[in-house]
Image (cartoon, coloured by chain):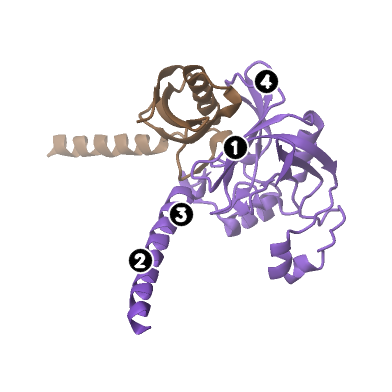
Chain colours: A brown, B purple
Amino acid sequence: MRTAFLAEMGLLTGLAVAGCSSTAPEPQNMARTTMQTAPADLQLTCASAAATSAGVDANKVLPVGSSQLDATRYQVDLNASGQRYTCVVDNMGNVTSVQKAA
Amino acid sequence: MAGTARPRRRLGWVAFLFMAAGLGAALAQTGSTTQIFDPKTHKWINYDRKKARQYYAAHGQVPDAFRRQIVTFRTAEKPGTIIIDGNQHFLYLVLPGLKAVRYGIGVGRDGFGWAGIVRVGRMAEWPTWTPPAEMVARDPNAAKFAGGMPGGPDNPLGARALYLYQGDQDTIYRIHGTPEPWTIGLDVSSGCIRMNNDDIVDLHSQVQVGAKVVVLMQGAALYKGV
């Protein structure tokens, strides 16, 4: 009985601590939209990589869509002078793949 | 006659359904909501026009995230380039050393969002606003200024305007100030990029005519310069 009570109290304390410690974003990150997109600089990193891969002027490559793949990676869809490319970039700015879309 | 009317009517319904499906898809692509984090409740809350106006009335400024600040920005674009993230409501002015000034912006509402690679064709201080013909036709308030509204604090273009060009052609889109600063962070315009007046003055002071402008907008209705 006492053991069960202590376990219950421990659980409640744990939940309270977890609730209190839920971290708020930094003030500069306290806005978002429900459409999750890759950060702008990472989209441009992909545009630069696709320009090299496609052999086109970087001024003719535009990111047209993006999504988060997992905690550290984003997929960016690009229009490179009319050709579609897909790029994967991590949140440190490392491009892991650039492929012409089928 | 009656024999031809029925297929036409059926075709009309088919066209209507396709249009409705297309419109639905377009809205699904672009329809997103701005949210801000409430530090009191630790919850993300929707930030619409009404909430934005209340916030501005209570604080005298927009939420922290939409205020001017220096951020890390890893890009190969030259300093002086402008990057607009229409989905997240930020405009970045690239600085040396992988940094940028980030400003909050208001952008085109559903169906008016666009993306592309353009340039600053010209700039103006306290610009004259001339409403487009279709706005004059539908809005009696705009009709009063069909010949142009002189620059000033009530002018919809605010304190400065950067006119965006594709090659040598005016796109009709501008980056400009606003007399409605609470609309920063929202999808409210007809395609122009709006900033509060302090921010557009700051941007105008740092930008050269000819600067490259990249406009990112997932689900854009229109593309310019690519």
- Amino acid beneath label 2: Val
- Residue at 46 percent across and 23 percent down: it is A91
Of mark 1 and mark 3, the one earlier in the sequence is: 3
Of mark 2 and mark 4, the one earlier in the sequence is: 2
The answer to which quarter of the image holds residue B98 is top right
Q: Mark 3, chain letter?
A: B
Q: Are marks 2 and 4 on the same chain?
A: yes
Circle on res. B78: 4
Q: Are marks 4 and 3 on the same chain?
A: yes
- What kind of element bears circle 3? helix
- Amino acid beneath label 4: Lys
Residue B85 in sight in this render: no
Q: Are marks 1 and 3 on the same chain?
A: yes
Q: Position of residue B29 (x, y in %)?
A: 44, 48
- Amino acid beneath label 3: Leu
- Residue at 86 percent across and 52 percent down: it is B151
Q: Quadrant of the N terminus of chain B?
A: bottom left
Separation of residues labelled 2 and 4 (CA atoms): 50 Å
According to the picture, the residue beneath numbered tag 3 turns out to be B27
According to the picture, the residue beneath numbered tag 2 turns out to be B14
Circle on res. B116: 1
